[in-house]
Image (cartoon, coloured by chain):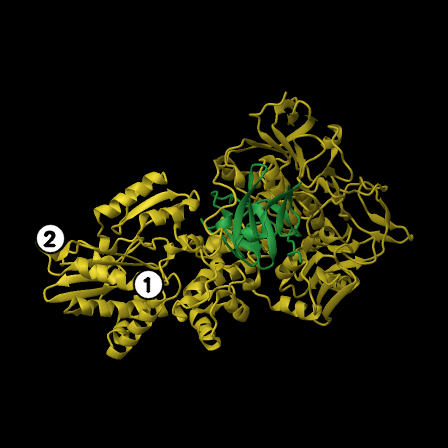
Amino acid sequence: MSDPAAPIIVVGGGIAGQAVCEAIRDRDPDVPVVMVCGEPRLPYDRVRLSEILVSGESAEALALRPQEWYADRGVEVRLGAWVTGCDTEAKVVTVASGSAVGEPLAYSQLVLATGSQPLMPPIDGIDLPGVYPFRGPEDCESIRAAAAESKHAAVIGGGLLGLEAARGVVAQGAAVTVVHLMGRLMERQLDHGAAEMLAPAMTDLGVEVQLGRQTTSLSGNGRVRQLHFADGDTLAADLVVVSIGIRAETTLAREAGIACGRGIVVDDRMRTSAAGVLAVGECAEHRGVVYGLVAPIHDQAKVAADTLLRRIGLDYAGSIPSAKLKVMGVDLVSIGEADADQSAIAEFREDRVYRKLVLRDGRISGAILMGDIRGHENLLEAVRAGELVDDPLARLVAAGEATAADLPDAAQVCNCNGVCKGEIVQAVNDGLPTPREVMAATRAGTGCGSCRTLVAEIVTMVSGDAANEPYYLCPCRKQTRQELAAVIREQGLDAVSQVGERCGTGHDCGACKPALAYLVSEIKGNRHREERDARFINDRVHANIQNDGTFSVVPRMYGGVTTPAELRRIADAAEKYEVPLVKVTGGQRIDLLGVRREDLPGMWRDLGMPSGHAYAKAIRTVKTCVGTDFCRFGLGNSIALGVDMEKAWEGLHTPAKVKSGVSGCPRNCAEATVKDIGVVGVEGGWQIRIGGAAGASVREADILCTVETAAEALRVTTAFLQFYRENADYKERMYAFVPRIGLDRVKEIVLDEEQGAALRERLAIAKAAVQDPWLERDEPYHPNQFVELVGPPA
Amino acid sequence: MTTRVCRVDDVPLGEGRAVEIDGHRVAVFQTRNGWYALDQRCPHKGGPLTDGIVADGCVTCPLHDRRFDLATGRCHSDDLRVGVYRVEIHDGDVWVDGSMTTQDDTRTALAA
């Protein structure tokens, strides 16, 4: 019987096994996981094997994660242990370690990540000393030792790995000949043009290339001495490295009765024919394809983790093969198909630059970039997306000029560790300042390292954006408020969708749509064409969305003054609509929280009070102290001024919320010195303050001026409010706006008699078109404005 | 299995509305480029995706701004995904195929 508390067992400690463990832990920190790792070392980056062939470093240098990672995350690793048998009925595997007898280990689910074995041709002499596969760190050690003594080495196989091995042997000072069965190098990834250019590039590195060579046997007395070819020729070699391909490791699966073809057959959820058994990586055969590359492993591992944890996720639909040759001095990337019905090629023979774009049915289906690999990430994305192209040559040029900024967030930057651009951007936005720290956190660039320049470019781009670039209202199209405002004015646009059609804004991420909606309404003095789908949900239903999808309702109470009748209606509405929480806000009002969307119109009707706009970027409250009416110390009638201000501005939208306060004396009970707009009663008049804050950071408001009467206070603050409405960036609070513009400049404009009057007039025009949004209870903009088609979840 | 979930007029242009199919809540969107349907619940913190802003074939969750592709259900910023469903329009009725689809061709042009 299977044991539900048993761990998920991952068989194999290669890149695939590790990727599965990572994907599981990304989704679930607790489910027990055991990784059984045949090699005596923690998972390492086999893609970079040729590096340690060149450098002689130990495999530990290529470790994917340090020891602590496994301990910290509760992934149990059994090193040097082999799964020798598997009973898929009983859900038990047999684990052998050293000379110990096999130990039964129960699993809840099993992931086969057994990888592959190097193919060795069945020819005479293949067992001779001096003949090595190129697969693991031990092979590297043997090859290095032999290369040091070698007069002439041969590499059988001119594929990606064979060429990397040849480069590694040359680095030890031996002469090397690559003998390749096919008529061109890397025939699976390259077309003739690129392969013809690659061969001399290898020769320049000291690697001789012989094509069309079928090796039929190896010979030597006690050690390999010669290769024999089908045409009768021979080649002297005292070291032979064999790299003709891989064979999926399926022994365990076959013995357990699991369906295998060339690999272990999996479906689109990475499930094998046995219940509760998955397979990932080079051992797996998906839709008839066995991938021998690293990028598909990460795609597969994520799907496998979703399946294991019963998460909804996309199916695995196969991967676009992409390969990068890691040979010093030869830059080569191949993506997707090497040939199809249409292509565009840019070739510069002298510089050994070859760039090809492959199209099938008008869509980008592949690319080969050699010598100049700029834009390969861009083209990988284009192949993935099956981008339609009219002018392939122009597209090829554009790819070469593409910068980090042109990549979509979903573009995979680091293929070794499956890190996409969005994750890097996120890391920078989370506060990591340098490429080095970003790489450590995201693991991007810590594999083969070929993406490090790009990672650095993205980090610079994102952090530089924040420091130097102007604030873009539409970051996707890099358009500022001023640029867009000019277009709206010149062309007389009056709706967000029109601005989108003219300027392209609001089409990409959509984040700028509410900003555009504000901009259009501000420029048109609230006589614009309202498009509710451009508004955030709060401005569609005039209430503040809560974490459970319900809403909060805050009716307006001018200056924080209410009446017994209002309080009764609030209490009645709270009971009638079963409001779970009634709370007094910091702005001297009452918040009804947890209101169902459908109840909003009825509740507003019952309340009979206007909207407090507590959900919007708009005039919020004007908080007041008691002032001269009752207070012993009051110098000015703060309630009256506060109520006047609130009524004068009520219903106006603003770039960001505006909270105000009026205190009747310098004791400042209404906390006016930390408000966006604050007024404080002083001997002989009112002190006006702007740009205060008491949020995440605290900022004492700047003194704009001191005036003698309440009427003057209202006039000056109104002029400043309109100046802010017309000039601030969206979401820019007054406490950021004032220092950006400079207090002196604000004074110059707002306190100028003529300019101040013009500002007040424009505000009055906008105000004249304001309507209480809660009146939409009787005239909704759509019959289903407040209606979900199904009720809330039980 | 395809279920009739609402009328075309029930969903304001550019917005989404939640419907229920076999007890499962599905968000149906009418965009300027056609109809889409995905899981109503944002897998991040359960936000109602119908209340998100729709642009460029994506919807942004109103709670924490996770952005999901309407055609694939893929999240732009992390590994989250939501299920996507095929939508068909017949005689002004909106039909949703409740069996999960994962293809990129779920978008259905408005039937004439």
A184 and A345: which is toward the camera: A345
Q: Is residue B12 visible?
A: yes
Image quarter for residue A717?
Answer: bottom left
Q: Amino acid at mark 2?
A: Phe
A113 and B29: which is toward the camera: B29
Q: CA distance from mark 1 to mark 2?
A: 36 Å
Contact between labelled residues 2 and 1, with CB atoms less than 8 Å apart: no
- Answer above or below: position of A424 versus A724: above
Residue pictured at 57% horizontal, 29% vertical: A7
Q: Which residue is most to the left?
A: A632
Q: Which residue is most to the right?
A: A232
Image quarter for residue A694?
Answer: bottom left
Q: Is residue A663 visible?
A: no
The yellow-coloured chain is labelled A
- Answer above or below: position of A447 versus A275: below
Q: Which residue is mark 2?
A: A630
Residue pictured at 34% horizontal, 58% vertical: A657
Chain letter, disc 2 residue:
A
**Is A517 situated left or right of A686 in this image?**
right
Looking at marks 1 and 2 on the same chain, the residue that comes earlier in the sequence is marked by 2
Q: What is the x, y in percent for residue A480?
A: 45, 69
Element at label 2: loop
Residue A736 marker: 1
Within-10-Å neighbours for mark 2: few <14, some 14–19, many 20+: few
The green-coloured chain is labelled B
